[in-house]
Image (cartoon, rainbow, N blue to C red):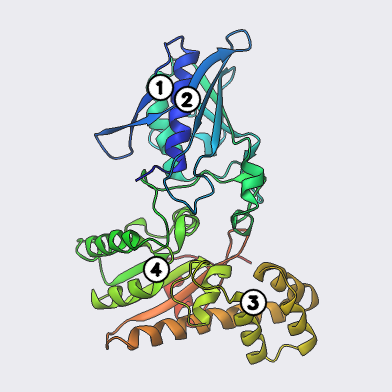
Amino acid sequence: MGLTLPLWVTAAATAATRALNGEQFVSKQKLVLPNQKTFIEVEVHSAAKFSSSEKALAINHSYSGLSLDVTNGLEIWVIVSWSEKNPNQDINKDLNSGDRWLLVSPGLGVGRSSHNHEICMSDFARNLLCINLRPLIPKDKFLHIEIVFPNGKNLAKRTSNEAFGVVEGLALIGNQAEAQVSASPNQVQDALQKLQKIVGSEFYKGNLIHVIGENGLDLAIKNGFPSNLLLKVGNWIGPLLVASAKEGVKNLLIFGYHGKLIKLAGGIFHTHHHLADARIEILISLAVREKIPISIINEFASASTIEDAFERLRQKDHQMAEKLWISMASVVEQRCNEYISRYGSWKIKVGCALFDKKRAIRWTGPIGSKQLDMYSISLKA
């Protein structure tokens, strides 16, 4: 099994910081994982000082071991230097201590948020950097890290990053050390084990949240969803819906990107694109149901993406566009509950909450709306 991108970046950052401190380069960096006492060795290609020894650069290549992962083999550069003043941005603080000794900047090919232009990285990635770099920083020193993915901007065109509000490159996300393909059966087994762990815990009261992929998990955490109820399900939505019902879940909220969950409205419950992709066709069906003018529906057929089709409708009639997505969320809820009922009779209510390409939680079905209220989560205007 390969490793996620945050591990390769942190290994390079560690090697570069050691070089900046004048230490001899070693190809294998020992990294401590968050909330674990063990360490893992991660390969780094090279590291050395430059610019009159005021900066250091480390280079390596990621290896996820996943053939469908665009970051597999990605070249990574990490440039480090001492900062003259304390980086006071909250987003760059140590997640454990609150110290502001680390400044992380997105270089070429690294994704930025379209909302605030800050680097797109998960809490796991930032925590991993903090844990492993803090022991290397002398007192009264502030470290500046610039991360560069030389081919990141081109590779990002082959991903859905922009749909999640990530621009100019690849996001540094990942919430675990080992890489997993979202279509792999191994992911189902891992999710089932986590499901059993959640429902067997003392804080479990019958509520659960399915989040779709790393972007969904990262966004759920940042929006205040209870982390101990989050289960990342990837593309294996159908089997995990039934498994959750069997485990006695009473209130299940599905939280994900609208361009992914629209497949559920069409009865597609394994959502990886290489198995099935009928999103435009499903959108057209929903539009017919909502009696949207045929002239606009015809435009949907020529749209390159769901987001493109939605934008065309939004520009013509904002209210109609909102109505369509709320209707879609309702149909997702209906289809999910019908799917579960095929396999048994359980007292479970499945709700749906959708976020858009700006990573804002925008639409829910009637069940999902009540569940968001239960978690004190508000929709974004």
Q: Residues within 10 Å of mark 4 (few under 14, many from 20)?
A: many
Is residue 201 something that shows in the picture?
yes
Q: Identify the mark at residue 236; answer none if there is no mark.
A: 4
Q: Earlier in the sequence, mark 4 or mark 3?
A: 4
Look at discs 2 and 3 and give the one toward the viewer.
2
Query: Label 2, label 1: how many angstroms apart (C-alpha)?
Result: 6 Å
Q: Nearer the viewer, mark 2 or mark 4?
A: 2
Q: CA distance from mark 2 to mark 3?
A: 44 Å
Which residue was labeled with disc 1?
27
The amino acid type of the residue labelled 1 equals Ser
Which residue sits at x=43%, y=71%? 254
Camera-side residue of 346 and 9: 9
Q: Are marks 2 and 1 in contact (CB under 8 Å)?
A: yes
Mark 2 or mark 4, earlier in chain = 2
User: Taking 21 as reference, is 107 left or right?
Assistant: right
Q: CA distance from mark 4 to mark 3?
A: 21 Å
Mark 2 residue element: loop
**108 lies above or below 307:** above
User: Looking at the picture, which amino acid does disc 3 mark?
Assistant: Ile
Local SS, label 1: loop
Evaluate if marks 2 and 3 touch, with contact meaning CB atoms under 8 Å apart. Answer: no
